[in-house]
Amino acid sequence: MIVALVLFIAVAGQTIDGFGTAKFWRFVALEVIPVALIALPLALVVITGEIDLSVASVLGLTCTVFGKLWAAGVTSLPLLVVLCLLLGGLLGALNGLFITGFGLPSLAVTIGTLALYRGLAYVVLGDKAVADYPISWTSNAIAPIPGLTIPWMVLVVLGVAVILGVVLHATPIGRGLYAIGNNDEASAFAGIRVARTKFWLFVLTGTMSALAGVFWTFRFASARADNATGLELAVVAAVLLGGVSIFGGRGGIVGVLAAVVLLATLRNALQLADVPANTLTIVTGSLLIASVVGPNLVTLTRDALHRRRTKTALTLAASKGASPS
């Protein structure tokens, strides 16, 4: 992903007018922030062999609750942020309860809650928008790092990436996640609390989706029920394109973060090139399919070559009158 990102930047910088300017990278960073906040914890969920497709709906419901409470007179924005994070954790816990408590497949559960949470968002706020937030908050949420044009929230994303990266790659918890993704029954016999681990991963994903919802509300200075509709496509594409196996047991944080940046850079570059929005969706969907099909083709090719080498070795051994062993 890092090599692909560097190559794309090199090519686009020579072929697309306006690519690579400070303003361009600011818009890329603003697009990266909410996707990365969700994709990074979701990567841990997918590594354990599960999936959460309700993340964008959690974001949308969080936005509407935030706007509803603000319109109702709850003027303490720090309190609203905390309440929204708690709500996101609760929504994630509901997913985790159905999946780990009742043994239901995560794909079916989160497709259902995708529709449920989005529907509740329309119940809470309807087709209205709440947009009268203090300018100090909306401007500070996207304020740049002093001396740069990149928003300071990028530092939060990097902090989350470092924390999750250390947990995943340098602690027994991370090794347990890989073990669960490869064989959850064997992991349970090894003493890993599989159900509890998965449950808290869904809580974490819900909480981070809520944080992305708070950022989304402040960035656009608007709380609407349709906020981030379809964002789950970009999030899942980033996770799988970043090297996390859809079957679990493989992947890393660096690849996911690089994939998020690559997708955001690609989308903004295509917009500069006046590519229609529906074409951008086609590109994202194509990359998502490629991220699933590509590793399988590599595995099949490797297995075929291994069988061919083994057959050749046995043939040579037989021709020399040696034992097949």
Image: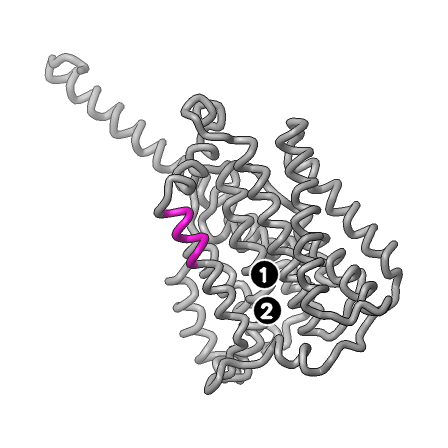
Name the secondary structure under disc 2: helix
Disc 1 target residue: 35
Determine whether 7 is above or below 25 in the image: above
- The residue that appears at 73% across and 47% down in the rendered structure is 114
Which segment is the magenta one? 162-169
Q: Position of residue 312 (x, y in %)?
A: 23, 26
Percent across and percent down for residue 85 are 66, 56
Q: Type of residue at label 2?
A: Glu
Q: Is residue 232 above or below residue 302?
A: below
- Which residue is located at x 58 percent, y 72 percent? 30
Q: Quarter holding the C terminus?
A: top left
Residue in front for this viewpoint, 270 or 235: 235
User: Nearest the camera: 24 or 134?
Assistant: 134
Q: Which mark is residue 131?
A: none
Nearer-the-camera pick, 267 or 149: 149
Colour pattern: one colour
Is 164 contained in the magenta span?
yes
Amino acid at the residue labelled 1: Val
Residue 162 visible from this viewpoint? yes
Q: Is residue 276 above or below residue 293?
A: below
Marks 1/2 in contact by CB < 8 Å: the verdict is yes
| Disc 1 from disc 2: Cα separation | 7 Å
Q: Which residue in the structure is indicated by mark 2?
A: 31
